[in-house]
C-alpha cells in the first residue's frame, strides 16, 4: 500500500487532518476508483479540494465520480468551469467525451477526443478512446484504423491488436486480417498472440494447414499457451487427425484446470475415431464437470446407440430431456432409441412431440407414419400422411406410403393412384419403399402397374 494511502486511511480512523500535496491526493483517489471504492474516493476528493481548491486535476477526478453516479448536470457544470480556466487540458475534453458517449452522442464524443488529441502526450490512449467510439457507431473500418495506430505505437498493446482483428471479423475481411497479421509478425515474429490470431483467421477461410502452422508457432513461442493448444487441437480435428488432436487437448488439460469443453472435445475425437468406450469415458468426465452440459449428455446417448446398448442410450437421453424438454432434436433422438427398444407408443409420442415443437422435417413425419403403420394404426398413419402432405406437396416418400396405407385399408383405387404419383416423382425410390411393404409388391396387379410405369 502506498505511503500516502496508509496516512490517509490512518487519518480517517483518528479524525485527525493531515496535509497531502495534490499529486498524493490524485494517487489516493485513483487507487479508490480503480478498486471500485467510490465512497472513499468521494471522501478523498472532498478533502483534497478543501486543501487544494484550485487544482484542475482534482476537480476532474470529481467530474469522473459525478459521471459514475450519473450526475451528468453537475459533471457538465464543473467541466465548464475547468475548461474556462484550462482550455488546453486534455482531460477536460476526455471527460466531455465520456459524458457525450454516455448520452449516445458518439460523433460529438469523437470530436471532443480529437481536440484532446491535439493537447496530449499520450496519443495511444486517446486514439484508443476514439476507436471505441467508432465501435459504438458500428463503424468498424474507422475503429480498426485507430486501433491499428495504437499497435504502431506499442507492438505489445495486445488489447488493441485483438480489437483490430475483431473489426476485421465484424466486416468479414478475413483475407485482409491475414495480410495485416503477417505484416505484424514480420516486425514482431515472437508474438504468440498474433500467431494465435492468424491461425484463427486461417481457420475461418478453411485453410487448415496454414492454421496448424500458425498454432504450432504460438505454442512453440509459449509452451504454456493453453488457448494455442486448444485451437491447434480443433484444427487437427478438421484435418481428421484424431489422435494428434487428443494429444493437444490433453496438454491443455495438464496446463490448466480441466473443463467440460475440453473433455467433450476429446470424447468427440474418440467417437470420430470409432473408439466408443473411450469416448464415453470422456463424455462422463464432461458431465461431471458440468452436469447441465446438454451436448455431453447427447453425445453419451449417441455413443451407446453406436454400441447398440439402447437401454443406456435411453437413460442418457432422459437426462438430456430433463435439462431441455423443449428441444425437438432431443425428442427425435428419444423416439429413435425407443424404436430400437420396441417401445412403439413412447416412440410415437416422441415424434409427435417433435412436431408440436415445430420440427416438421419430412423424416420426422415419415418416422411417425412408419411406427403407426408397424403397430397397425393405419387410420392414424393415414391422418399423419395427409397432414404431412400439407407441408410437402410433391414428395415420393409420402406418395409411396399413402399407397401402402390405402392397401392395408382395402382401398386399391386410391392406393394405385398414389403408387403412380410416387413413381412419377421418383421411380428409383421404389426399391427402398419395397422394404416397408413387401407383401404389397408381391401382388400381381402391383407388379403389372410397376412394369407399365417403369422408365424406358
Image (spheres, rainbow, N blue to C red):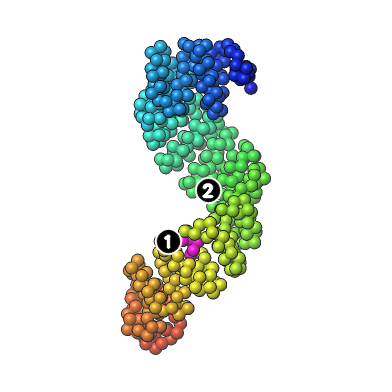
- Any magenta on residue 132? no
Q: Using the image, determine if residue 212 lies above or below residue 398.
A: above
The x, y position of residue 195, in whole percent, is 55, 38
- Foreground pick, 70 / 155: 70
Q: Quadrant of residue 408?
A: bottom left
Residue annotated with mark 2: 208
Task: Judge depth for marks 2 and 1 and give the one in front.
Answer: 1
The x, y position of residue 325, in whole percent, is 49, 59
- Foreground pick, 275 / 177: 275
Q: The C terminus is located in which quarter?
A: bottom left
Q: Residues within 10 Å of mark 1 (few under 14, many from 20)?
A: some
- Foreground pick, 126 / 330: 330
Task: Residue at 54%, 19% (x, y): give it.
Answer: 44
- Foreground pick, 180 / 230: 230
Q: Earlier in the sequence, mark 2 or mark 1?
A: 2
Q: Quadrant of residue 97?
A: top left
Which residue occupies the extreme right position in the image?
A: 254
User: What span is in magenta?
Assistant: 328-332
Q: Using the image, determine if residue 307 lies above or below residue 408.
A: above
Magenta region, main secondary structure: helix
- Any magenta on residue 331? yes
* Horizontal side of residue 104 vs 50, given as left or right: left
The x, y position of residue 82, in whole percent, is 41, 15
Task: Residue at 50%, 25% (x, y): give it.
Answer: 153
Q: The N terminus is located in which quarter?
A: top right
The x, y position of residue 156, in whole percent, is 55, 29
Would you say residue 118 is visible in this rendering? no
Would you say residue 344 is visible in this rendering? yes
Residue annotated with mark 1: 357
Query: From mark 2 to mark 1, how far is it between C-alphas?
Result: 38 Å
Q: Secondary structure at mark 1?
A: loop
Which residue occupies the extreme front position in the image?
A: 15
Amino acid at each position: 500500500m502506498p505511503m500516502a494511502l496508509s496516512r490517509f486511511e490512518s487519518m480517517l480512523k483518528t479524525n485527525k487532518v493531515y496535509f497531502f500535496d495534490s499529486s498524493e491526493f490524485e494517487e489516493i483517489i485513483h487507487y479508490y476508483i480503480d478498486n471500485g471504492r467510490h465512497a472513499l474516493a468521494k471522501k478523498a476528493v472532498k478533502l483534497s479540494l478543501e486543501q487544494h481548491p484550485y487544482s484542475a486535476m482534482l476537480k476532474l477526478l470529481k467530474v469522473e465520480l459525478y459521471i459514475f453516479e450519473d450526475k451528468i448536470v453537475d459533471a457538465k457544470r464543473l467541466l465548464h468551469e475547468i475548461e474556462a480556466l484550462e482550455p488546453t487540458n486534455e482531460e477536460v475534453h476526455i471527460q466531455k467525451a465520456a459524458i457525450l458517449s454516455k448520452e449516445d452522442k458518439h460523433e460529438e464524443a469523437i470530436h471532443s477526443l480529437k481536440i484532446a488529441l491535439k493537447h496530449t502526450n499520450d496519443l495511444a490512449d486517446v486514439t484508443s478512446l476514439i476507436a471505441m467510439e467508432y465501435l459504438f457507431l458500428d463503424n468498424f473500418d474507422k475503429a480498426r484504423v485507430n486501433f491499428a495506430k495504437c499497435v504502431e505505437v506499442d507492438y505489445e498493446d495486445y488489447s488493441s491488436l485483438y480489437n483490430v482483428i475483431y473489426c476485421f471479423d465484424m466486416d468479414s475481411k478475413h483475407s485482409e486480417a491475414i495480410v495485416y497479421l503477417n505484416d505484424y509478425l514480420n516486425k514482431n515474429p515472437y508474438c504468440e498472440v498474433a500467431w494465435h490470431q492468424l491461425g484463427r483467421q486461417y481457420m475461418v477461410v478453411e485453410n487448415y494447414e496454414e492454421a496448424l502452422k500458425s498454432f504450432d508457432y504460438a505454442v512453440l513461442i509459449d509452451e504454456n499457451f493453453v488457448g494455442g493448444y486448444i485451437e491447434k487441437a480443433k484444427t487437427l480435428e478438421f484435418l481428421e487427425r484424431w489422435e494428434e488432436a487428443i494429444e493437444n487437448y490433453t496438454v491443455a488439460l495438464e496446463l490448466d484446470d480441466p473443463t467440460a469443453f475440453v473433455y467433450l472435445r476429446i470424447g468427440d475425437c474418440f467417437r470420430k475415431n470409432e473408439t466408443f468406450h473411450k469416448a464415453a469415458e470422456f463424455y462422463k468426465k464432461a458431465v461431471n464437470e458440468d452436469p447441465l452440459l446438454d451436448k455431453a449428455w447427447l453425445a453419451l446417448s449417441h455413443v451407446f446407440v453406436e454400441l447398440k446398448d439402447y437401454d443406456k442410450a435411453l437413460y442418457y437421453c432422459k437426462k438430456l430431456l430433463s435439462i431441455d424438454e423443449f428441444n425437438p432434436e432431443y425428442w427425435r433422438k428419444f423416439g429413435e432409441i425407443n424404436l430400437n427398444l420396441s417401445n412403439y407408443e413412447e416412440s410415437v409420442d416422441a415424434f409427435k412431440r417433435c412436431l408440436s415443437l415445430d420440427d416438421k422435417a419430412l423424416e420426422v413425419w415419415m418416422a411417425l407414419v412408419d411406427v403407426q403403420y408397424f403397430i397397425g394404426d393405419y387410420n392414424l398413419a393415414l391422418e399423419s400422411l395427409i397432414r404431412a402432405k400439407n407441408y410437402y406437396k410433391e414428395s415420393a416418400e409420402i406418395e409411396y406410403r399413402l399407397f401402402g396405407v390405402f392397401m392395408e385399408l382395402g382401398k386399391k383405387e386410391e392406393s394405385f393412384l398414389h403408387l403412380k404419383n410416387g413413381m412419377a416423382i421418383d421411380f428409383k425410390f421404389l426399391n427402398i419403399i419395397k422394404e416397408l411393404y413387401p407383401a404389397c409388391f408381391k401382388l400381381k396387379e402391383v407388379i403389372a402397374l410397376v412394369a407399365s410405369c417403369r422408365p424406358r
